[in-house]
Amino acid sequence: MEFWMAIFIGVLVAGAVFSLLRRSVFRLVIGVMLLSQAANLMVFTTAGLRTGQSGIIPADETVLSAAAADPLPQALVLTAIVIGFGMLAFAIALVYRATRAIRSHDLNDYKTTDSEL
Amino acid sequence: MNLLAMPLIIPVALALLGVALRNHAGGRRAVGLLTAIGVPAAAFLVLVETLGGDIAHLAVGNWRAPFGIVLVADLTAAIFLFTAAVTASLVFFHALLNPMRGALDKWFFPLANFVMLGVNGSLLTGDLFNLFVWFEVMLIGSFVMLILGGKRAQLEGGLKYVVINLVGSGFFLGGVAMLYGITGTLNYADIAVKIQLLDEPAFAHSGVLLLFGAFAIKAGLFPFFFWLPAAYHTPPAVVTAFFGGLLSKVGIYAFYRTSSLFLADGFAPWQNLMLWAAALTMITGVLGAAAHFHMRRILAFHIISQIGYIMAGVAMFTVAGLAAGLFYFIHNNVAKTNLLLISAVVERKRGTSRLDRVGGLYKAAPWLSIWFLISALALAGIPPLSGFWAKLGIVRAGIEGGFGWLVLAGLAVGMMTLFSMTKLWAEAFWKKEPEPGGWEDEEERGPVTRLGLAPVVAMVGIILALSFAGGAVFDVCNAAASQLLDPAGYIRTVLGGEVEP
């Protein structure tokens, strides 16, 4: 299962890079979105993709059984998703304002700050 | 009450207070004054606690490491914390003494406090995922500060800054996932222990390398620096001055922390990569500055170039190199922030800092010119000013460590820096003021009172203190570097002495 997950994350990253390199600002945001999802899935996968065991320690034991998935990365990924969501909301709002101010979604028109003066 | 929480509690309290009082003119100034005093005061308390060589730590919620999040301050963290806080505080005083208008006035202090919260958190945390969270706190605050006012240039620069940083966050999270997957822990000290026990540390190192990619983006290291000159000159000048001493330096701190803890003995394979990155950062930064003709853009490129020197110190990975890097950081933070503050004053006086549109400042404001000259010569490394000692430290560490080519690059870049500073001096201060050509102001003009220059003078005072009494500071940097290269003490403090590193 982890193997297929790794392939899937790779495909997501490839898609992200492809989108990031396009000239449209909207594609840029989609690329960032895909990349953050790929990173989230990577964190999620470190828990181990196992089924049939809850992450609760039985009353007469002190450690989690090895068959259960590690619960910590799931907490981490929850945090990461929330942060990523906030960042994405900001990025989308920014793109909206930028396209209204610049009246173009072609990144070649976003280069006025790169001049020498 | 543990002092280590203070650098986090004060900014968050003031940020919320600032949001609440944003429509009340007196309240805004009160929050500003409290920020300018409270932030360095908290950092000073942490510095005092660690100056003797002790490592302060706080287990949040009393959860023992490595299970809970810890805040840790060793001497390196305290140096970064205090230097950043003092330069930020002087920028805050500048903002108070040179009144701002509109949205900037309303939101500057609340947002600056959120950025400070993120910066202080990143410097103090002892947990990798927590570092990610603090980075994001710092980023979201800086995103909003950068586009405050919503001019076209700001939106363009802001978009680049946002996208590259979100890509960096993706790298970071990927690195965290890999390290956690391999070592099963997120606590710095615990990772440092576990990474030593691995049979195949190369896998863990590839995770560390992903982190390095993220830090390089934050620090503005070659080849990831393009966002910095595209974005730093677009916001109001006081915001640039605030960013100049903080944002990229947190990335550098992350390099200090992770390379000493995670790589330790395994540093050698990556050393060449980092040395090259440092050298190319210096060179490309200074060449970019040479091509530009706008005060703040030139200074933005110099931020990059100077980051290269600090990185060179880290990449040498010897006590002398790390210590010289730390001293360089202190000197550079003060000198660079002061130059940016002076550019803010120039823009306030003339409405722009384009070198073809300003001039005659030596005649109009002779004292300002003197302050500029001292800071600029310090940045270029002219003896006896602080930059000379900082560069001397790097050069000596480089020769001792056998990195002759890096030393040569550093010296050549020093010459180029001097060229760039002379250009600023000749164009902005010495030449006659050009006839006004009916152009549009980039920055709102306003009066600059004598009191409004006080923060600039204070910074010059710090530069002179570093120049003539830098020995004491260098000793502290040396102690910090020895602490970094012997992480056993750090690990024992955090993990409670039960684990033998």
Image (cartoon, coloured by chain):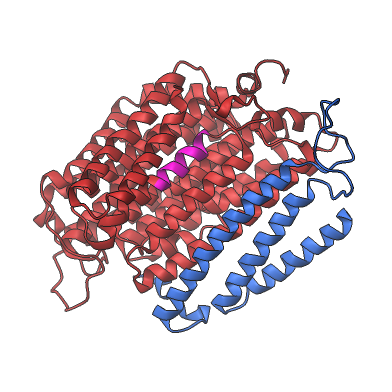
Chain colours: A blue, B red
Q: Which of A45/B376 is in front?
A: A45
Q: Quadrant of residue B208?
A: top right
In the rendered image, is residue B249 in sight? yes
Residue B48 coordinates in the image, percent (x, y): 40, 20
Residue A40 coordinates in the image, percent (x, y): 69, 55
User: Residue at (59%, 40%) from the top-left corner?
Assistant: B130
Q: Quadrant of the C terminus of chain B?
A: top right
In the rendered image, is residue B410 in sight? no
Tell me, yes or no, whether the highlighted magenta stretch contains residue B117: yes
Q: Report the magenta stretch's main SS.
A: helix
Residue B225 coordinates in the image, percent (x, y): 51, 58
In the image, residue A74 sits, relative to residue A117, either above or below, namely: above
Tell me, yes or no, whether the highlighted magenta stretch contains residue B236: no
Residue stretch in magenta: B114-124
Q: Which of A26/B451 is in front?
A: A26
User: Residue at (41%, 59%) from the top-left corner?
Assistant: B144
Q: Quadrant of the N terminus of chain B?
A: top left
Taking the view exactly as shown, the residue that stands out farthest to the bottom is: A103
